[in-house]
Amino acid sequence: MSSDATDRLPATAEAEPVRTADVEVEASRLVRIIAALVLVVLSATFLVGVFDIRSPKGLDPQGPRFFPLLVTAAWLLLSIGYLIEGLRSPRTAKAETETGTSIADRSWFEPVALCVLLVLYAFLVVPLGYMLSTALLFWGAARVLGSRQLVRDIVVAVVTAVVVYIAFTQFLDISLPEGVLGL
């Protein structure tokens, strides 16, 4: 009788073995969703805090509230987008890169390397100056994230650092560390 019961089960009801790759992908997906939720909560909290900034100019672009409002609103929108992407990502086995190493094997490298770069940046921004340390940070981040266009990365890093430096010092009247360049 028990053999008849198992014979009548549909083929889809058979238990499939759980592959390690599937578990790793699901864990990675869960981590992304949790990180996105943390980012949404933090950005929403900061956005509410922006409205505590007292300003007689309200939301005027020259007032002290405008730039923080712009940054935190963008942060919130990007966090929501990241959450949606995490929720919509498929639950498939891990992919392999061209070199044959799995993406999950490198999943720890980028965040750790970027954190190290940010800590180095915090220590170097005053002695080296804003432009030089920021250009090094942008170049290093591009390399960590996989870019292999050396000349383009250097040009983009330097141009971005110079444009941001000029925008902050000339237009927003915010002083940034001059460092070894003395600018």
Image: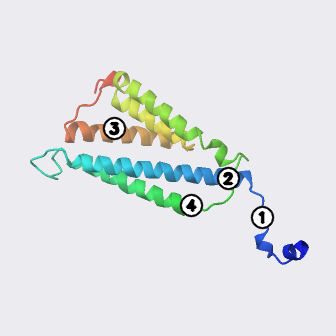
Front one among 6 and 33: 6
The colour scheme used to paint the residues is rainbow
- Tell me where residue 126 appears, x and y as whole percent: 34, 24
What's the CA distance linking mark 3 and mark 4?
A: 37 Å
Is tag 4's residue or tag 1's residue first in the polypeptide sequence?
1
Mark 2 or mark 4, whichever is nearer to me: 2
What's the CA distance linking mark 4 and mark 1?
A: 24 Å
Question: Which secondary structure lies at badge 1?
Answer: loop
* Residue 94 shows in this picture: no
Judged left or right of residue 56, residue 44 is right
Is tag 3's residue or tag 1's residue first in the polypeptide sequence?
1
Mark 4, other Cα within 10 Å: few <14 / some 14–19 / many ≥20: few
What's the CA distance linking mark 2 and mark 4?
A: 14 Å
Mark 3, other Cα within 10 Å: few <14 / some 14–19 / many ≥20: some
Q: Quadrant of the N terminus?
A: bottom right
Is tag 3's residue or tag 2's residue first in the polypeptide sequence?
2
Taking 33 as reference, is 125 above or below it? Answer: above
Taking 57 as reference, is 151 above or below it? Answer: above
* Residue 109 shows in this picture: yes
Is tag 1's residue or tag 2's residue first in the polypeptide sequence?
1
- Asked if disc 3 and disc 1 are in contact, CB closer than 8 Å, the reply is no
What amino acid is at disc 2?
Answer: Val
Question: Which secondary structure lies at badge 3?
Answer: helix
Judged left or right of residue 152, residue 179 is left
- Asked if disc 4 and disc 1 are in contact, CB closer than 8 Å, the reply is no
Mark 1 or mark 2, whichever is nearer to me: 1
Front one among 100 and 85: 85
Disc sitting over residue 23 in the figure:
2
Is tag 2's residue or tag 4's residue first in the polypeptide sequence?
2
Disc sitting over residue 162 in the figure:
3
Task: Write down the residue under mark 1.
Answer: 15
Q: In the picture, residue 29 is in which quadrant? A: bottom right
